[in-house]
Image (spheres, rainbow, N blue to C red):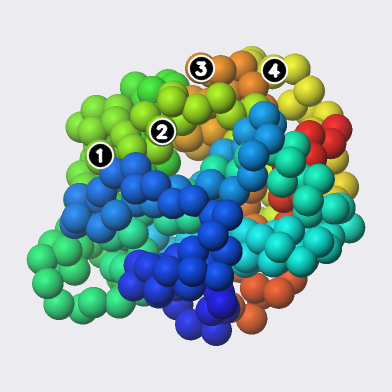
């Protein structure tokens, strides 16, 4: 149901969502916005309980492997719930009754399609080719993380955005391009704004933001220490085998996780899956899924 042997482009995402919704009517879909290129940004909602967990993937185009990861979990979870089974050793029915999963599987559909070379014609791709000339040392399209305007969507949130701008400009990222350009202002891009506004409308107890690569979990923003955050991060690390680390200062501003922690004082995590150079090969998918299954179930169960 979730293809794990082909690049996961936005058309593949749409076909997969149609299949999931047809097979599991308990999954609800909302479109929370559109990308610069007019592609829908969807959230999938599953569960009826008060413990709300927000999960997002593919803020960065060449980190598209995170999209089938989160969808594979949802498909397996929905099947287990329908069949009265377990997911990760936990009763799916109990998880479903206790929690609600809000899953945004592809924050950056334009960037994913650029990075995968899904459509090598049309205005999005042609403009990306043009912008990539600003940074000839970054491989194209494999190095493309940004949206179709050349803005890094995980440097768009109102938590130290000005500091992120100062840091990235000092590193030479002063123009739109494949990565690390912060945009003209916080929340200038429709994709980041869509996730920001959706989050404000919800009551998430915690959030998981999936990226690649490094097999590391980042849990902190500056000196903000949400209650239970460190303990939950240690649980995630033990379950996955990933390392729990503080976010490096030079990349520790204006991310979704940073803003969520600052605004809500609740646990937010960036999880960097896999090892190697983005885009990661699909040969790593099975290990990545196995490593992260316990994180998903612990997050939904409220385990600490």
From what the image shows, is residue 31 above or below residue 261?
below
Dot 3 or dot 2, earlier in sequence: 2
Mark before the other along the chain sequence, 3 or 1: 1
Q: CA distance from mark 3 to mark 2?
A: 14 Å
Q: State the residue in front, 194 or 223.
A: 194
Mark whose residue sits in front, 3 or 2: 2
Of callouts 2 and 4, the N-terminal one: 2
Marks 3 and 4, how far apart at CA:
12 Å
Of badges 2 and 4, nearer the viewer stands 2
Answer yes or no: is residue 155 visible: no
User: Disc 1 vs disc 2: which is toward the camera?
Assistant: 2
Instruction: Judge the density around disc 3: few (<14), some (14-19), many (≥20) Cα neighbours within 10 Å.
Output: few
Q: Which residue is mark 3?
A: 263
The answer to whether residue 259 is above or below residue 69 is: above
Give the distance between the C-alpha atoms of the residues marked 3 and 1, in whole angstroms: 19 Å
**Mark 3 or 4, nearer chain start:** 4
Asked if labels 2 and 1 touch by Cβ distance under 8 angstroms, the answer is: no
Are circles 2 and 4 on residues that touch, CB within 8 Å? Answer: no
Q: Which residue is mark 1?
A: 189
- Residue 261 location, x and y as percent? 58, 23
Residue 45 visible in the snapshot: yes
* Displayed quadrant of residue 5: bottom right
Q: Are marks 3 and 2 in contact (CB under 8 Å)?
A: no
Q: Which residue is mark 4?
A: 225
Position of the C terminus, as image quadrant, is: top right
Corner quadrant of residue 15: bottom left
Quarter of the rendering occupied by the N terminus: bottom right
């Amino acid at each position: 149901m979730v293809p794990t042997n082909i690049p996961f482009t936005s058309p593949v995402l749409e076909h997969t969502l149609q299949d999931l919704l047809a097979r599991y009517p308990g999954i609800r879909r909302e479109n929370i916005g559109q990308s610069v290129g007019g592609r829908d940004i969807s959230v999938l909602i599953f569960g009826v309980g008060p413990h709300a967990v927000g999960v997002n993937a593919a803020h960065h185009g060449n980190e598209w492997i995170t999209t089938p990861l989160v969808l594979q979990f949802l498909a397996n979870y929905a099947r287990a719930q329908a069949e009265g089974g377990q997911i990760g050793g936990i009763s799916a029915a109990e998880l479903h009754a206790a929690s609600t999963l809000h899953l945004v599987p592809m924050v950056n559909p334009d960037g994913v399609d650029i990075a995968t070379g899904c459509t090598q014609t049309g205005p999005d791709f042609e403009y990306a080719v043009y912008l990539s000339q600003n940074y000839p040392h970054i491989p194209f399209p494999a190095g493309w993380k940004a949206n179709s305007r050349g803005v890094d969507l995980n440097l768009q949130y109102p938590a130290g955005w000005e500091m992120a701008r100062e840091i990235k400009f000092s590193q030479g990222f002063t123009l739109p391009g494949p990565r690390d350009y912060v945009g003209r202002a916080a929340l200038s891009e429709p994709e980041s704004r869509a996730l920001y506004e959706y989050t404000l409308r919800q009551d998430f107890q915690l959030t998981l933001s999936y990226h690649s690569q490094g097999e590391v979990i980042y849990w902190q923003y500056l000196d903000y220490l949400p209650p239970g955050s460190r303990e939950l991060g240690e649980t995630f690390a033990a379950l996955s085998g990933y390392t729990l680390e503080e976010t490096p200062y030079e990349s520790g501003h204006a991310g979704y996780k940073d803003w969520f922690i600052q605004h809500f004082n609740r646990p937010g995590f960036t999880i960097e899956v896999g090892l190697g150079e983005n885009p990661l090969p699909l040969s790593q998918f099975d290990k990545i899924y196995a490593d992260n299954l316990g994180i998903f179930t612990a997050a939904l169960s409220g385990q600490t």
